[in-house]
């Protein structure tokens, strides 16, 4: 990621952490997947077992983004964060 993208992404991550209202599980899973894709690339770990539904949901949210570049994932994260934090 370029310097501008890094700064925007880091600011968006900080803004999401400061949200006063819960955006809902669907949005949180989308943000989680985008964050992981932007910071780590494609998922490489196996899918958690049936007794870990939260872990499975997170894994699936990240796995859906396989092949998305880190830059694109960061840009999508920033766009969602901007929508959530807009006045």
Image (tube, rainbow, N blue to C red):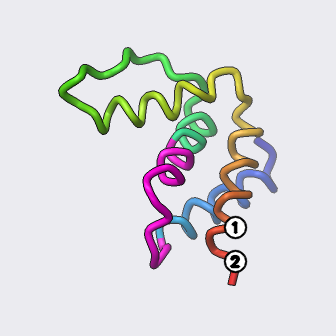
**Quadrant for the C terminus in the image:** bottom right
Residue 84 picture quarter = bottom right
Magenta stretch, residue numbers? 18-32
Q: Element under label 1?
A: helix
Residue 68 picture quarter = top right
Q: CA distance from mark 2 to mark 1?
A: 5 Å
The percent coordinates of residue 81 (x first, y second) are 64, 63
**What residue would you read off at disc 2?**
86
Front residue of this view, candidates 13 and 76: 76
Compared with 81, 47 (above or below) is above
The percent coordinates of residue 17 (x first, y second) are 47, 66
**What residue would you read off at disc 1?**
83
Front residue of this view, candidates 63 and 41: 63
Residue 28 in magenta? yes
Q: What residue is shown at x 72% (from left), y 48% (from top)?
A: 76
Q: Are marks 2 and 1 in contact (CB under 8 Å)?
A: yes
Q: What residue is shown at x 63% (from left), y 29% (from top)?
A: 65
Q: Element under label 2?
A: loop
Position of 11 with respect to 61 (left or right) is right
Q: What residue is shown at x 48% (from left), y 45% (from top)?
A: 29
Position of 64 with respect to 29 (left or right) is right
Residue 51 in magenta? no
Local crowd size for mark 2, using a 10 Å CA cut-off: few (<14), some (14–19), many (≥20): few
The percent coordinates of residue 30 (x first, y second) are 55, 45
Q: What residue is shown at x 69% (from left), y 40% (from top)?
A: 73
């Amino acid at each position: 990621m370029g310097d501008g993208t890094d700064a925007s992404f880091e600011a968006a991550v900080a803004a999401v952490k400061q949200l006063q209202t819960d955006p809902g599980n669907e949005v949180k899973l989308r943000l989680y997947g985008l964050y992981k894709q932007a910071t780590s690339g494609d998922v490489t770990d196996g899918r958690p077992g049936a007794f870990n539904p939260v872990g499975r949901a997170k894994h699936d949210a990240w796995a859906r983004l396989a092949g998305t570049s880190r830059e694109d994932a960061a840009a999508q994260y920033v766009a969602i964060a901007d929508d959530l934090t807009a006045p």
